Amino acid sequence: MRSKHVAKKTPVSLLSAAIATALFAMPGLALAQQAATAEQNKPEPKDLDKVTVVGGSYRASLEKALEAKRDSADQIDVVMAEDIGKFPDLNLAESLQRVPGITIDRDAGEGRSISVRGLGGDFSRVRINGMEALSTTGGTDSSGGANRSRGFDFNVFASELFSSLTVRKTQSAQVDEGSLGATVDLRVARPFDYDGFTSTIAVQAAHNDLSGATKPRVSGLIANTWADGRVGGLLSVSYSERSLYEEGFSSVRWGEGGTSGTTTFCSPLGYDPRLPGNNSGRGSSATHCHNSGGVVIPRPANTADSVAAYETARDSFHPRLPRYGRLSHEQTRTGITGSLQFKLADATTLSVDGMYSKLDATRAENFLQTISFSRNSSQGGKAQTIVREAEVNERGDLVYGVFDNVDVRSESRFDELSTEFKQFSALLEHRFNDRLSMSALVGTSKSVFDNPVQTTVTFDIQNLQGYSWDFRDNPDLPDITYGTLDPANPASWNWISNPVANSTGSEIRIRPQATSNQFDNAKVDFEFRGNQTFTFHGGLSWKRFDMSTSDFRRANELLIPALPAGTSIADISMLLTGFGKGLGSSSPSSWLVPDLEKLASMFDIYCNCNTGVPGGDFSLTSITNGNARVNNFGVREEDTGGYFQTNFDIDLAGRPLRGNAGIRYARTEIDTVGYSSVGGGTAVNYNHSYNDWLPSVNLAWDAAETLVLRFGAAKVMARPQLGALNPGSGITFNSTGGTSTARVGNPFLDPFRATTVDLSAEWYFAKDSLLSVGLFYKDIDTYIQEFRATMTYAETGLPVEWVPAGFDLQNEVDLRQWINTPGGPLKGVEINYQQPFTFLPGFWKDFGLQLNYTHVESTITYGNSDVANSDVTFENDLVNLSPDSHNATVYYDNGTFSARVSTAYRSNYLQRVPGQNGNDVEGKRGTRSVDASMSYKLNKQLSFSLEGINLTDAYNQQFVDSVRDSTSVYHHTGREFLLGLRYKF
């Protein structure tokens, strides 16, 4: 049976259930009423660059957002702040997931990145105050690690800093190129948005029920205008802390039992074929399977049971590093926005904006894991392991096993992480006369991610007897036993500084890294009103983007110093306690972990030097270390372009038709730098350029007083992932016959290109209500993927001069290289329903409902014939695409008391195609989150709130292989509750 996790009955969840029950019990909702009159439903034109304060009401924010959507010629969705400095969700990504067609991915229980209509973050652009920007952070390995690409990390920013966000799903010539999915416009407040003096402060206490920590969250805004409204200033600040645990099981993928002598289990005595074969250097012979840590391991007796267990395990898939883990996250987020506005003349306005955000975090990862199943015989791996019992499920997974001679590890990793984002811009708007106007924007933004400390230290045990795992009762969360090992006892663990050949030793890994992204923008736009029907727009733009990333590592992480005389494991360790809350497995509640602070001090591991003791070389290298070299590169991209667009407002069949048609030209020039494997790190530099002509058209026809029909078509492009443009290579050669690895970039990639068509019908059947259906199609004719294959070095086509002396060109190489592929179609449907129940009697009129559903399909052709001797292609779903997603929000708002409960769901999606270790894919299982909030206004100035996040304690579940669906991650972060107050001066 799978473990069942049921939310505790908190006040928030009880209120959520009550609202939902009462609402869905009511008969005759939206479609039972008559449509409102045209005058009631017809909104005034909405200027999306102007924020209107909506008066502190969730319902009012929905009304204004719906007005903006209806009036736009493009297909857009808008989310507006409910009040000054009060966004509907604590995280911008969480708010975006309420928009039809948008799903999010989380890190540390918080929304980090988005996918729009099945297209991941690399396909969407984000603009802050009209200027393109990029913010990147570091995450856990299972959530993608450090962001070295174009995807925008929304968790850098506090939501209180923003007043609105707009998602542009169709392209117009006036909007900068670079998106296949959407352009997301984030807007901060400006002083002219308000009437005179405005100020507010909000304070919350946030409690996480898994970690038990309670942390503050504070924000405030002050704005004023002077000189009869001709000068204005605004300052907003936010500060928050988070402290949470992430606990559960992970496998670090699943691997094949294998038939190779170095990657399979120890075969029974006399079994043919004998594996591993004779190898005096590793102690394998007819009677012994391995020499591990100085212990010669005899083969098991040849009995029916031992043969059956061996064959069962050999022919199955098993977890590579089965482990329990706790990740402790500590975060501090600071944000500041400032704005000055000047009415220089009646026709001229200057707006100067600045924004600063800082996300500081530490993450401690502690794992109790078994490493033998991921290693070959030279590392003391599976070849030394004897299978005593084994059971395989119908899909081929080794769901139960008992093993002797396994190596167990306590691994502790500590990261210090920070992202600092700065943006400054100036916008000049001038109206020459009643027909001609201009706007000019210049600015710069910079995001610097720094991970100065990333250190991993391990304690190890060799040749443990009686180890077992059991997935039979729960395929996501196994029961793991460790024989006679007491993982909490210091006497159980070893500090192995000088391991015997072909065995496991302890490690000290030091891997600091950093990434910097900077945008410099300048553009000018002109608008000429020809007459009441036609308006002409044109403009020029220039943008320079600079990205650089670095990675440093020790030359040999397996060489470590011996403990000083008189020092024991007890002196350099600490006890992790209280593990497993809510897991329901037989996992140990505590185990011993390395104390990194004591070890760092003892060995001076951060000196970046050779301390002079054996194993004490802590010098960090980058380009000369093959594993680090591939992450040291830079990209400079200079984009110039221009556009011409005609906006029109005419009649078609006696009904209003508005729209735009135009064309955009973009030239992209790329300059890349990296390091090749030649000479331990030779600098390489390549240039590439391409041009794009991008026509577009958008139509919105008011076919009836309450019906809007929309059509959009465009050619679009998105530039390649930054990591794919890396011109360097990282190659590790294995001269002993094992598989070598090659990671090769491609600075000559063409961009993603597609032709898009959108068609939708929007029925505004009542005041502030909408029922819409949208169809979308994207013909992706140029796609980019990481090609993965195992072949001989000679077949890769890589330079022969890279090969070291003694390396056989027929040796196998695990090759990964970014390539252009044909792509494939993407199509889908969006359904959106929104309505306040003002037609109901009594207090029921203050209820309302939002629902949306999106279905997306896309089959992409993977593989490529450009790689030497490899013309295999195959089809699979687009990475990051969830075929189904839906959202629902039930709310109550009477102006004094408001409450709502929201749920968001996305179905399974793929994260890597093809997968690793013999798995065809890697992906994430469907997620469903439930949030709720309530607030009460004591008076016009003071209000109180209670919010609940992730009320069902949804698990992050990741899997490998589309057929076996084997669990690779099963982690949870607990529920969060926030109690707060707001005061408006």
Image (cartoon, helix red, strand yellow):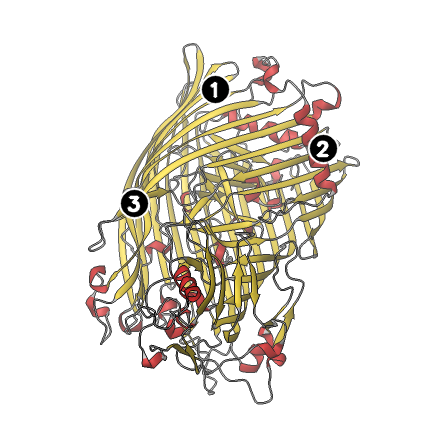
Element type where label 3 sits in the image: strand
Element type where label 1 sits in the image: strand
Q: Residue at x 60, y 85 (%)?
A: 567
**Cα distance, mark 3 to mark 2?**
49 Å
Which residue is labeled 3 in the image?
A: 874
> In the figure, 914 relative to 96: above or below?
below
Which residue is labeled 1 in the image?
A: 708
Labelled disc at residue 130: none
Q: Amino acid at mark 2?
A: Ala
> In the figure, 90 relative to 245: above or below?
above
Q: Amino acid at mark 3?
A: Phe
Neighbourhood count class around disc 3 (C-alpha, 10 Å): few under 14, some 14–19, many 20 upward: few
Q: Are marks 2 and 1 in contact (CB under 8 Å)?
A: no
Q: Position of residue 715 (x, y in %)?
A: 33, 34
Quarter where residue 73 is shown: top left
Q: Nearer the viewer, residue 264 or 610?
A: 264
Q: Nearer the viewer, residue 756 or 31?
A: 31
**Cα distance, mark 3 to mark 1?**
41 Å
Q: Are marks 3 and 1 in contact (CB under 8 Å)?
A: no
Labelled disc at residue 18: 2
| Between discs 3 and 1, the one toward the N terminus | 1
Q: Are marks 3 and 2 in contact (CB under 8 Å)?
A: no
Q: Is residue 645 visible?
A: no
Element type where label 2 sits in the image: helix
Q: Position of residue 598 (x, y in %)?
A: 60, 78
